[in-house]
Image (tube, rainbow, N blue to C red):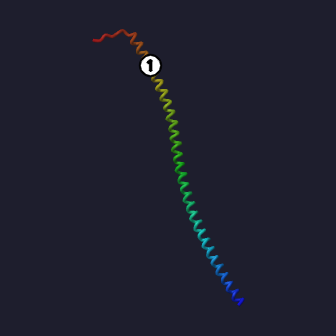
C-alpha cells in the first residue's frame, strides 16, 4: 500500500510537473511573440525616423538656399540703393545746370 501511495504521489507530481512545463512553454512562446512584435514596431519606428530625418535634411537645405538668396538679394538691394542715390545726385546736378543755362540764355521769342 505504501508503494502504491508513493507511486500515486509520483504520478501526481509528474502530472503537476508536466502542467508547469506546458505553462512555462506557453509563457516562453508568448514572450517570443511579444519580442517579435516589439522588434517589428521598433523597425517601423526606425524607418519613420529615417524618413523624417531625410525630410528634415531636405527642408534644412531649402532653408539654407533661401537664406543664401536673402543675403544675395540684400546685397543687390544695397547696390540698387547706391545706384538710385547716384542717379538722384546726377539728376539734381543736371537740374541745377539746366536752371543755370536757362538763366544765362536770352529769352527766345516764339511766333
Q: Residues within 10 Å of mark 1 (few under 14, many from 20)?
A: few
Give residue 94's quadrant in the image: top left
Which residue in the structure is indicated by mark 1? 92
Quadrant housing residue 36: bottom right
User: What SS does tag 1 mark?
Assistant: helix
> What residue is rendered at 55% in x and 54% in y?
50
Q: Is residue 16 left or right of residue 83?
A: right
Q: Nearer the viewer, residue 69 or 19?
A: 19
- Relative to 19, 64 lies left or right: left
Q: Residue at x 39, y 12 (%)?
A: 102
- At a point 58% along the width and 66% down the height, the residue shown is 34
Q: Is residue 111 above or below residue 66?
A: above
Question: How many labels sit on residues?
Answer: 1
Q: Position of residue 68 (x, y in %)?
A: 52, 39
Q: Position of residue 40 (x, y in %)?
A: 56, 63
What is the residue that sits farthest to the right in this orientation?
Answer: 2
Instruction: Judge by depth and name the residue closer to the eye, 4 or 83.
Output: 4
Q: Which percent across, then down, holds residue 96? A: 43, 16
Q: Is residue 109 left or right of residue 13?
A: left
Q: Is residue 34 above or below residue 60?
A: below
Question: As drawn, is 49 to the left or to the right of 99?
Answer: right
Q: Residue furthest top?
A: 106
Percent position of residue 111, x then y: 27, 12
The residue furthest left is 111
Q: Quadrant of the N terminus?
A: bottom right
Q: Residue at x 52, y 43 (%)?
A: 63
Amino acid at each position: 500500500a505504501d508503494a502504491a501511495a508513493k507511486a500515486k504521489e509520483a504520478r501526481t507530481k509528474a502530472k503537476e510537473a508536466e502542467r508547469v512545463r506546458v505553462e512555462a512553454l506557453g509563457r516562453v512562446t508568448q514572450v517570443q511573440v511579444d519580442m517579435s512584435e516589439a522588434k517589428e514596431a521598433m523597425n517601423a519606428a526606425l524607418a519613420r525616423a529615417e524618413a523624417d530625418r531625410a525630410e528634415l535634411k531636405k527642408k534644412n537645405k531649402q532653408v539654407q538656399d533661401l537664406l543664401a538668396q536673402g543675403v544675395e538679394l540684400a546685397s543687390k538691394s544695397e547696390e540698387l540703393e547706391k545706384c538710385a542715390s547716384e542717379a538722384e545726385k546726377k539728376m539734381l546736378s543736371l537740374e541745377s545746370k539746366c536752371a543755370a543755362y536757362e538763366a544765362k540764355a536770352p529769352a527766345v521769342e516764339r511766333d
